[in-house]
Image (cartoon, coloured by chain):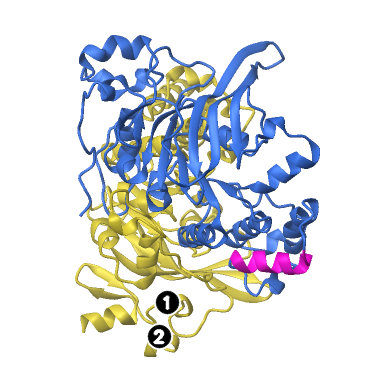
Chain colours: A yellow, B blue
Amino acid sequence: MNDPGAPLLEMKDLRVFYEVRGVKAPAVDGVDLSLRAGDAVGLAGESGCGKSTLALACLGLLPRNATVEGSVRFQDTEVIGAKPGRLRALRWAGISMVFQGAMSAFNPVKRVGDQVVEAILLHEDVSRSEARSRMQELFEHAGIAARRAGDYPHEFSGGMRQRVMIAMALACNPPVVIADEPTTALDVMIQAQILNLLARLREERNIALLVITHDLSVLAQVADRVAIMYAGRIVEEDSASELLTTPRHPYTRSLVGAFPVVGDPASRGVPTGLPGDPPDPAARPPGCSFHPRCPNAFEPCDHIDPVLERHGSRLAACHLVAREES
Amino acid sequence: MMAEGTRGNAAALEVRDLEVRFASRRLFGGSGGEVRAVDGVSFDVESGEVFCIAGESGCGKTTLGRALLGLLGPHSGEVSISGLNPARLRGEELRKFRRQVQVVFQDPMGSLNPRQSVYEAVAEGVRIHGLQGDEGEIVARALARAGLRPPERFFLNYPHELSGGQRQRVIIAAAIALEPRVLVADEPVSMLDASVRGEILELLVRLKDEVGMTLVLITHDLAFAWALADRVAIMYLGKIVELGPAQTVLTEPLHPYTKSLLAVTPEVGRRHAHEVLTGEPPDPANIPPGCRFHPRCPVLRSGEAGSQEPRCLEEPPALRELVPGHRAACHVAAAGGVRTRDPQTPHK
C-alpha cells in the first residue's frame, strides 16, 4: 500500500510540443501539478491553452506529431515513454477519463451495459457475471435505472449519456479520474445533477479528480483547488474559494469577470470581455505571454518572462502580483 | 390575455396566445399524437428593450424563437413585429418582414456556409433584401460594427480560418447589416470560451444601443439573463410561468420553478448546497394535468402548498400579476403562500 499522503498523479516540468510546419510549438510548457487521493483539482483556461493536451499526456494518448518532455508519474509508474502494454493497463484501471461529447465515446451498435462489462473484462480477471453485477452497481451509483443497461447509446439523452460515461470511467475502480469539460453542452439542471454526481462519487470512492474546463462557475461547484492555464503554463493557482473570489492575475480576473453572478449589482450590465486571442504556440510573444492582452501590463512585462512564485497559499506568474507583494 | 400596461414606448414585438404544435411520429411511421411545444404564450417587447426567454432544454424557448422569426407557422395565436404579422404576409411583404427580424444561433460553425467567404456571408442577405447603397460599404460597416476590424482583412477569409468568437461576429454582422428592428439571439455564447463570451455579450449590448435594435435573448443561463436583460420570461413546458423585470424575477422570484433554476445556476466563487430537481427535462408530448410543474414542484412535495394542493393537481394556473409588473403562474404564489423572498443569500 502506498503512503496515503503521497501524490497519486504527479506532473513535473511537463512539456508537450506539437510539430507544426517544421516548428516545434509548445502546447504544454513546463507544468507542475499533483493530485492526492480525494483531491479535486480544476484546470481552467481558454481553448488552445493546452489543458486537454495535458490530460492526453497523462494517459499516453497524444498524437504522433507530439513530443513529450518532463515527467508524469502515476503511483510508481512513469507514464512518459512507457510501453504500450503498460499504458493500456494504466488507462481505465489507473487513470480514466470522462470526455466531453459522450456520444462519440460509445459504440453506437452495442448495448451500453455490454460496453461497460467489456471494459471490465478487458482489464480484470473476473467472470462475466461478476462484471455484470459490478456494471449494475455502477449504474445504480450513477443514477441510471438498471433496465437501461440494455439500451443503445442513441436512446439516452445527453445527461443520461454523460452518466453512463461516468459509470464506464469508474468501471475498473481507477484511483484517478480526469473529466474534460464534463458538463459543457448540457442544460443547467442536468449540469447540476452531473456535478453533484461527480462530487458524490469522489467522496464515496476517495477518487482523485481532475476537472478540465473553460467554465469557472463549474469549478466553483466541484474543485477544491484551481489552476489557471494560459499558453501552456499555469499562471495562477490556489484553493478554489480563494482563487475564484480574489483572483490576482489579470488573466484570471478577466476570466472570472466573464461570469456574471445573479443578484450581484456589479455584474448587471455589460460583462467584461478580454480582447484579442491567445498567442500562437509557435510564435510566443517575448516576456509574459499574456502581456499583449493584459490591461495592466507595465515596464518588465514585454521582456521579462514571469516565473510562478508562491505568495502565501497563492501561486502566481505575474510581475504585477510580485510588485504588489513586495 | 390582457395586453401589458402601456409604458410609453411602442411595442416592437407583440405575441398573443401563441401555440406551436408538432405531430410526433413514432419510429417506422404511426402517429404518436401531438407535441405542444409552445402552448399559449403572450408577451410584448418594447422597442429598445432586452427581453430574455429562459428555461431548460425542451421548454419550448427555441421553438418560440423560431415562431418569432416566422420560420415556423403557429397553430394559433399571433406574432407581430411593428404591426406586421408574418402569417398573413406573402412574397415581397414577407421578405420585408424577415428583414426586420434577424437571428443569431448557438453554433457559429453550423450557421455559416463553409464554402462562403466572410464577405459573401454578409453580402448575401444584403442582396436578397435589395438594400440601397454600396454593397461593399454596407458589408464593411457591418463587419466593423461587429468588431472585425479592419473589415477588409476578413473579406476573403473562410469560416474554418476564423476562431469561434470571430465566426459568431460574422453571423452578427450578417444580421445587423440588414438593420433589423428585432434581433433574436438563441444561446449566442453557450458554445464560446469564457473570454470570448464577455466580448460577444458586450458587442450585443453595444449594438442594441448603437443600432437601436430590440434584443430577444434565448438562454438557459440565468446569470447571462441577469447581466443583460431588462425583463425576463421563464418558460416551462411551453408556457411562461413567470414574467417581469430581471431585477425582481431573479432576486425575488415568485414561482418555485424559477427558484429551482436559480438554485442550480452555478456561481463563480461560491459553492451552494442546492436541491436539484430530479428527473429529465419534462416531455412536451406528455404534459401533466393541473399545474404542469406539479410533478417536480418542491413546494408541493414538501407540503407547503397547503390548501392550494388540490388546485395544483387539477387546475392549470393562469399567469397573473402578483406584484406590479411581475407576473407568475402559480396557485401557491397567488395565494400569498410560501413567500420566501430570496432563495439565495443576497450577494455581498
Name the secondary structure under disc 2. Answer: helix
In the picture, the disc for residue A301 is: 2
Q: Is residue A155 toward the left or the right of residue B311 in the image?
A: right
Q: Nearer the viewer, residue A144 or B315?
A: B315
Q: Is residue B275 shown in magenta?
A: no
Find out whether the residues at labels 1 and 2 contact each other: C-beta distance under 8 Å. yes
In which quarter of the view is residue B150 placed? bottom right
Q: Is residue B136 magenta?
A: yes
Q: Residue at x 20, y 30 (%)?
A: B339
Does dot 1 land on a helix, a strand or a loop? Answer: loop
Q: For the magenta stretch, what is the residue range?
A: B133-146
Residue that appears at 51% across and 82% down: A285
Q: Name the amino acid, label 1.
A: Cys
The dominant secondary structure in magenta is: helix
Residue at 57% in and 38% down: B65
Compare residues A127 and B23 and report the one nearer the observer.
B23
Seen in the picture, residue B84 relative to B240 is either above or below; the reply is: below
Q: Residue type at mark 2: give it.
A: Cys
Image: A26 above or below B233: below
Query: Which residue is tagged 1?
Result: A294
Q: What chain does badge 2 belong to?
A: A
Q: Which residue is more in the foreground, B135 or A36?
A: B135
Q: Position of residue A224 (x, y in %)?
A: 27, 53
Q: Which circle's residue, 1 or 2, is located before the other in the chain?
A: 1
Residue B118 seen in the figure: yes
Q: Is residue A303 left or right of residue B275?
A: right
x and y, in percent, of residue A20 in the image: 65, 71
Mark yes or no: residue A69 visible.
no
Considering the image in quadrants, where does the C terminus of chain B appear? Answer: bottom left
The label shown at residue A12 is none
Q: Position of residue A320 (x, y in %)?
A: 31, 80
